[in-house]
Amino acid sequence: MAQPSIARLGHVGIHAFDIQKEREFYENVLGLQVTDEDPKMGMVFMSAQPEEEHHEFLICGGRNVDDKDALLLQQVSFRCNSLDDVIGYYKRFKQHNVQFDMIVSHGNAVGLYFRDPEGNRCEVYWPTGLKARQPYLEMVNLEEDPEEIIRKIRESVAEHGEQGVVDMRALQGQDIAAPGQ
């Protein structure tokens, strides 16, 4: 297997005190388009190029303390050209004892969430080419054959793609440790 590689920066997420105020700024002042949102979960997905990238920017709730050191960065995501790249990073991260947060399908992407040495949340992902309403989180086992992973994602998107789905185990970080970790 070739060394995995990053194609480009995919998207950045931030935490906000006032999601609506942030949404209005990024939509009306900066000109980003809302591609999905879930007011109940406190998430707004935005893109300058929605035909090419579902979201390049994500606004999340959760910045609710009045402290200059409050958590602002939600995540930095790096786009890969193939599922094999994501699997390659999974194997590399295991070798380097990188902490995983979750390994999931977003329907429209497979995402491997991890922490850098200072605890910043990052993601490497591959876009599947499928359309799925966000938020969409289902656990993925990157130890499986890539064709099987893609087959399962296609089946899930056929069932849940229009309304989205959230597997709470994925959010809680259950069952994400690699075998033997």
Image (cartoon, rainbow, N blue to C red):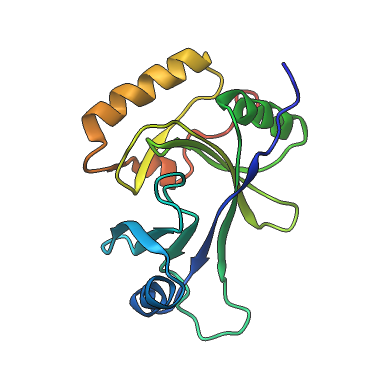
Nearer to us in this view, 179 or 92: 92
- Report the number of discs: 0
Left or right, 38 with respect to 127, comes to left
- At x 67% / y 26%, what residue is drawn? 88
- Corner quadrant of residue 41: bottom left
- Corner quadrant of residue 70: bottom right
Q: Quadrant of the C terminus?
A: top right
Q: Quadrant of the N terminus?
A: top right
Left or right, 56 with respect to 3, comes to left
Left or right, 128 with respect to 76, comes to left
Q: State the image coordinates of residue 64 (x, y, percent, origin top left).
A: 45, 78
Q: State the image coordinates of residue 93 (x, y, percent, origin top left).
A: 71, 35
- At x 75% / y 25%, what residue is drawn? 3
- At x 42% / y 41%, what residue is drawn? 170
Q: State the image coordinates of residue 106 (x, y, percent, origin top left).
A: 40, 39
Q: State the image coordinates of residue 78 (x, y, percent, origin top left).
A: 62, 45
- At x 39% / y 79%, what residue is drawn? 18
Left or right, 91 with respect to 163, comes to right
Does residue 86 lie above or below 116 as drawn? above
- Corner quadrant of residue 59: bottom left
Nearer to us in this view, 87 or 117: 87
Does residue 164 lie above or below 116 as drawn? above
